Image (tube, rainbow, N blue to C red):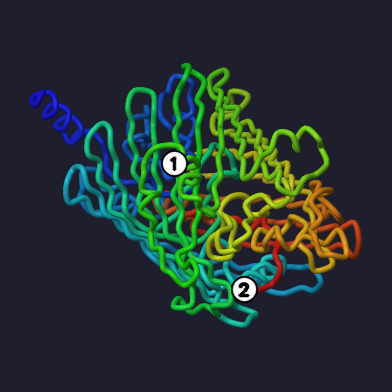
Amino acid sequence: MKRTFLLFVSACFTVVGAAQPGLFPLSRSMEAPYAARLHHFKTEAHTSFRPYLKADLAGTKDADSLRDAAILPALDRWAGATGSHFRGTPLLDAIGGISAGEGTSPTYRTGLGFWTEYDPHPAVSLHVDGMAWNERFPEFVDTLVRHTQVSPGEGYAYGTGPSFTHYDWNAYVSWTTGRYFNITLGRGRNFIGEGYRSLMLSDNAYSYPYLRITTTAWKVRYTNLYTLMADIRQSDGDPNSFRKKATAIHYLDCDILKRVNVGLFEAIVWQDDERGYPRGYDFNYWNPILFYRPVEYQLGSPDNALLGFAMNIKVQRNTLFYSQLVFDEFLLREVRAGDGWYANKQAFQLGVMAYNAFRRPGLDIRMEFNYVRPFTYSHEDTRQNYAHFNEPLAHPYGANCQEALAIIEQRTGRWSFREHFSFAVLGTDTGGYNLGNDIFASPDDRPPRDAEGRRQNYGYYLGGPTPVQLIYNEVRAGYAVLARAGLSLEASYIFRSRTPDEGDGYISHTVMLGLVCRFHDRYLDQDARSRPR
């Protein structure tokens, strides 16, 4: 028995020399050369939790397809640094243009930073990256930034306009303990799912401290993610005034068939200060086993819990159908009744991604539909909503929305061409009440149904009571200057139309040209949907 135990421990912690430690940048632009191979029907890589483990990418055929740059070959080779313990490059944004909406104004984004990695051991990787920006946003983004006080995914926006300063930094130490475990402690963002959007956990919000434990065995991967987050309302950007909150997230995905993968998701959100008592990171939620709901019931806990399910099916060689279903609250009787019960808080996603579509190398096509019912991701204690740093942790539109999108991208050598179109219907709140749109407001702020002040429980349907139609279309062309830093010379055009059923509509046009850093993803297809705070 003792010998068996020692063999088990040795297997768990033996370093696999061929495995590359660390995480790949959370950037679809940088993942693009690997994506088709990762999702090929003969590949067994786990792709539902990003950022990817570098060991997963290294296991794919022709994984590193990035050639030396024609413009900056020395920097590109240093960033690749095959066999080296030390890598890194500068990060740079220098882009300008014109935004025309209610008026015409210049827009620009200037940023400077760096990324670097060091591998002190074949099983350990250290990473740091950071950037600071001064930016004058396009008009529709400026409205969002003034509303939330945050640059999308990039931190608190300091200033009063027309330009704002903001910064972001990420770091981690990642330890690959053999074939089965990876432990990463750091600061950054994570993403669950195969879609452009995620209804479970997206990288829409600002970076946060986290501990991520990834366990892989046979056809199963189990990821535990423990995070510390912040509610920054009424803080005026002072970190000492940020209110602490935390999440514990589990995601289990399993290849039940050669082409079929299923996933189980669970998240708990709680705030640090309960009636003046600092809870810290609740010991009960360190439990690494699904599901937390029985623990919640045992504790009589008021914390916010979400459950979810995913299914991904590979068809043909490089086509993936994917789906997500999330339950914030659920009562089957009320769902069947169809009366718009406020606590029927669910969301679902359906999508398809075709790599090398129509047998054309480098042509990727995505089509996706997202549906989020009113009040989803909100909570009676607004500090426990599913959000961080004034930004939703799932879909950037929050709740009470549906969206259809299509993305077509062609990559040829270092050139890339992209068309991104989305159409969304969003609900709006009226009369100072919460009608399911604002995840930063309590569901208890629903309108009264009688003179005694009891709240209206029914009649909450998607898009109600006054829907807004939102069209976003972005066309861009780019040339990769320094691929391993996500640096491209790009030209882009954004058309955006916002048309409410009541009131005046708004149309804007934005043209930009310059050097763009896509080391991390950034989402401009958003809308200011909560009350200003």
Q: Position of residue 281 (x, y in %)?
A: 38, 58
185 and 507: which is toward the camera: 185
Q: Quadrant of the N terminus?
A: top left
Q: Quadrant of residue 239?
A: bottom left
Which numbered dot is residue 290? Answer: none
Q: Quadrant of residue 510?
A: bottom right
Whether residue 277 is situated above or below residue 349 in the rendered picture: below
| Outermost residue to the left | 3
75 and 21: which is toward the camera: 21
Q: Residues within 10 Å of mark 2 (few under 14, many from 20)?
A: many
* Camera-side mark, 1 or 2: 1
What is the three-letter code of the residue carrying label 2? Arg
Q: Residue at x 48, y 79 (%)?
A: 238
Asked whether residue 519 appears in the rendered view, the answer is: no
Q: Residue at x 54, y 47 (%)?
A: 305
Q: Position of residue 181 (x, y in %)?
A: 28, 37
Q: CA distance from mark 1 to mark 2?
A: 38 Å
Q: Residues within 10 Å of mark 1 (few under 14, many from 20)?
A: many
Whether residue 404 is situated above or below residue 44 in the rendered picture: below
Asked whether residue 395 appears in the rendered view, the answer is: yes
What is the three-letter code of the residue carrying label 1? His
- Left or right side of 258 for 157: right
Mark 2 falls on what kind of element? strand
Residue highlighted by disc 2? 136
149 and 326: which is toward the camera: 326
Q: Position of residue 423 (x, y in %)?
A: 76, 46
Q: Residue at x 76, y 57 (%)?
A: 496
Whether residue 97 is situated above or below residue 265 in the rendered picture: below
Q: Earlier in the sequence, mark 1 or mark 2?
A: 2
Q: Residue at x 40, y 64 (%)?
A: 130
Residue highlighted by disc 1? 250
- Left or right side of 186 for 2: left
